[in-house]
């Protein structure tokens, strides 16, 4: 995606090619146009199925067990990952592993809080993009961010692989009269509060969790909203029509 806006005609109407932050927040912050003059355009995504599994996997013993993958950075204020850390500190008996990449400004705090948790793994190493996709594909779910509503590329990547996501979006930004009026909201476990996170993780780790149902919903959303075919079939006409209408 593109970390910014592209002015497409006079008076700064904007097209956003990134989902990394709430689109309405970014519009108001950078350009202050009305929502009718600014709209989101999903960025085309690579075919993730073209990545072959990494061959040297012997050291990643967690792959033999069920696990939740946390590829995002460990940040408490901005991403509220402390909600996950606190849940894990109370559920050391959980039989599902949690695998963190192990980076971020609050990573050392998280490692200290969870140092006695046998079900938590910090990779603490550089991991190639194809290997990250492989870890995603094998996981029960991935955890994204719970801070500013919106979703990053991890949600798109996971959905392309049919992997359920626990994160946060602003549902009011989707549908009629919204910023993303031509796009459905991602079918993630939407968590606005710490209690929402507790409910989602309890469900995944302790309830009868039907991953397949969530997997199909995520992949269908990706196909409808972010695949190359969706861009060319649905979004290019929208872009052309709205550009013409606003100029």
Image (tube, rainbow, N blue to C red):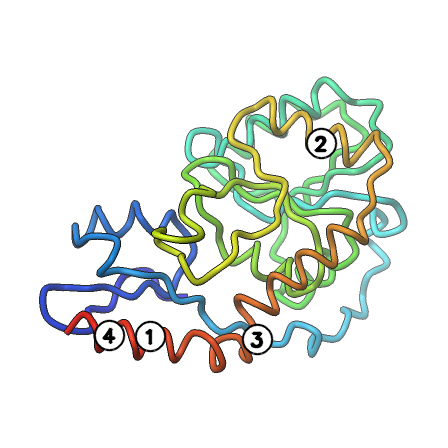
Q: Secondary structure at mark 1?
A: helix
Q: Is residue 241 above or below residue 211?
A: below
Mark 2 touches mark 3? (CB < 8 Å):
no
**Among the two numbered marks 2 and 3 on one chain, the one whose residue lies closer to the N terminus:** 3
Q: Is residue 184 above or below residue 80?
A: below
Label ID, residue 239: 1
Q: Which residue is mark 2?
A: 201
**Among the two numbered marks 2 and 4 on one chain, the one whose residue lies closer to the N terminus:** 2
Q: Quadrant of residue 235?
A: bottom left
Report crowding for label 3: few under 14, some 14 to 19, many 20 or more residues within 10 A (C-alpha).
few
Q: Is residue 183 above or below residue 8?
A: above
Spatial CA span between label 1 and label 3: 21 Å
Report crowding for label 4: few under 14, some 14 to 19, many 20 or more residues within 10 A (C-alpha).
some
Label ID, residue 46: 3
**Among the two numbered marks 2 and 1 on one chain, the one whose residue lies closer to the N terminus:** 2
Mark 4 touches mark 1? (CB < 8 Å):
yes
Q: Secondary structure at mark 3?
A: loop
Residue under the image location 74 percent in, 55 percent down: 215
Q: Secondary structure at mark 2?
A: helix
Spatial CA span between label 2 and label 4: 43 Å
Spatial CA span between label 4 and label 1: 6 Å
Q: Which residue is mark 4?
A: 243
């Amino acid at each position: 995606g593109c970390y910014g806006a592209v002015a497409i005609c006079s008076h700064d109407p904007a097209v956003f090619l990134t989902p990394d932050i709430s689109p309405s927040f970014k519009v108001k912050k950078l350009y202050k146009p009305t929502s009718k003059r600014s709209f989101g355009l999903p960025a085309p995504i690579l075919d993730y199925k073209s990545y072959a599994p990494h061959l040297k996997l012997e050291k990643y013993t967690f792959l033999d067990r069920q696990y939740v993958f946390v590829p995002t950075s460990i940040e408490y204020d901005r991403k509220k990952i402390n909600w996950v850390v606190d849940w894990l500190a109370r559920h050391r008996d959980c039989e599902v592993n949690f695998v963190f990449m192990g980076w971020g400004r609050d990573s050392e705090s998280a490692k200290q809080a969870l140092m006695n948790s046998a079900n938590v793994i910090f990779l603490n190493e550089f991991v190639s993009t194809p290997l990250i996709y492989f870890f995603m594909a094998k996981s029960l779910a991935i955890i994204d961010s719970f801070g500013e509503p919106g979703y990053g590329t991890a949600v798109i990547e996971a959905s392309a692989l049919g992997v359920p996501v626990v994160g946060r979006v602003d549902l009011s930004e989707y549908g009629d009269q919204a910023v993303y009026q031509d796009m459905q909201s991602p079918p993630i476990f939407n968590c606005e509060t710490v209690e929402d996170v507790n409910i989602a993780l309890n469900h995944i780790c302790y309830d009868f969790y039907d991953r397949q149902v969530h997997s199909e919903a995520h992949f269908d959303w990706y196909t409808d909203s972010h695949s190359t075919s969706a861009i060319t079939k649905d979004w290019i006409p929208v872009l052309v029509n709205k550009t013409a209408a606003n100029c």
